[in-house]
Image (cartoon, coloured by chain):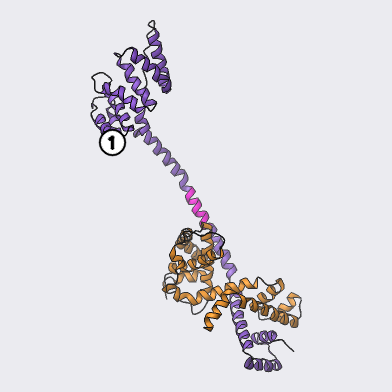
Amino acid sequence: MKTREELIQDYIDQVLSPADKQLFDTLYESDTEFRAELKLQEEMTNLLSRRLSSEEETLRTNLKKVETTYRKGKVILWKQWLIPLAAAACLLIVAKFVFFPSDTALYELPEMRSEIVRGNQNNEADSYERAVEAFNAKDYQESTPILLELHYADKAILQYQFYLGLSLIGEKKFDDAQKYLLFLADGESVFQQEASYYLGIALMELGQTEQAKQRLSNIDPSSKIYERAKKLLDSIK
Amino acid sequence: MHSDQKYIQFLLQNNGEGIQHIYRKFADKVVALIRHNSGTDDDGFDILQESLVDIYHMAKYKDFQLTTSFESFLLLVSKRKWLNELKKRKNKEVTNVENYVFDIEDDSQAAYRDHMTLVEKEKILMELVDTLGERCQEIIKRCMVSKNQEKIAISLGLTYAYLRKKKSECMAKLGERVKAHPFFKGNREKTNR
């Protein structure tokens, strides 16, 4: 005798023998659980047949293939732009330095001129030359004390005071720097225009922007520092 | 018929060109949706593929109708799939999931609800088949595709009578697992109410 499960499967697959059909009908009419089980098995069979007869695997293979190509294409597309982008970035950097000096360039200190005169060497000249060497090597911690000593030894030589102010800027001692540069910027010496420019930088660094702007805008257009002053002024406006 | 029905046809016909078109047009949108909801690009592409397979299965039902744009439908299916995936990843802390991903009970979903449920049922059923023994899996998979079970019995080295007996046992076992599965249990309780 067949089990209930076998009867259900035989019914679904339409291979129920006449004798089994009678038993099946009896169970179907009298047993609600049997009916529920039959309903579930029919539903499962429909769903499984549909799913298993589909071309899902072929579709999946195709989807995977398209996805790989699509994603690879995106990477290639991105990489294709990488070299031109890098080149453009390099050009921009070059252009920036050539045509638009950076803030760093605007802050750059001038070279300190050597005053070596053959046969005219003395202690003061030696000290000055040591200061020149240190200053031009950007060793401001070395150049500042030498220039300070020279300045206090002879305050009439404004060149010492000017480079002392710049050396202090190099050391980022802006407060000290402005004290030495202020005198020159307000005077009438050959250092007046450049002193005003570097005083402007010191004031900017000290957060005194309005005073810095005033100092920079007072620089004479005929001065060689005028263009830099203008750019610096534009950058802080 | 909705003008976007062509995308459904691409899937039904497994049309390579058409599927490429689907990827070019919609892939980034699905991936972005997943990425903005705690997923990665890989998650996004997995969800896209699974959603397209689901749409293919839904479209195979004769009464299936595309009532919205294909994009809305694809995003709806993808959201639903991603939500299920997030639920599965219980141990992983999920953050930054946009509220609307959870709030997907909208009109467009209602139109597709029955088909989406059917396809989910099929998918779970297939997963349950895979939990059975190898012999059962083989018998069920082959008997569902071909009606010629005598031939199947020969190819499996079984007698026809044994195959019939074994098939009924395997299907009964599968029936038990279906009844115990929360998805079917929940649906049955809803139906009985």
| Residue position marked by numbered label 1 in the rendering | A234
Identified by mark 1, the residue type is: Asp
Residue B10, compared with residue A214, is above or below; it is: below
Specify the principal SS of the magenta part.
Answer: helix
Residue B110, compared with residue A123, is above or below; it is: below
* A210 sits left or right of A141 in the view: left
Q: Secondary structure at mark 1?
A: helix
- Spot occupied by residue A15 in the image (x, y as percentages of width and height): 68, 87
* B68 sits left or right of A175 in the view: right
- Spot occupied by residue B129 in the image (x, y as percentages of width and height): 64, 73
Residue A155, compared with residue B105, is above or below; it is: above
Foreground pick, B134 / A79:
B134
- Spot occupied by residue B130 in the image (x, y as percentages of width and height): 65, 70
Quadrant showing the N terminus of chain A: bottom right
Foreground pick, A181 / A227:
A181
Q: Which chain is orange?
A: B
Q: Which chain is purple?
A: A
Q: Residue at x 25, y 29 (%)?
A: A215
* A34 sits left or right of A119 in the view: right
Quadrant showing the C terminus of chain A: top left
Segment colored magenta: A69-79
- Location of residue A111 (image quadrant): top left
- Residue A227 in sight here: yes
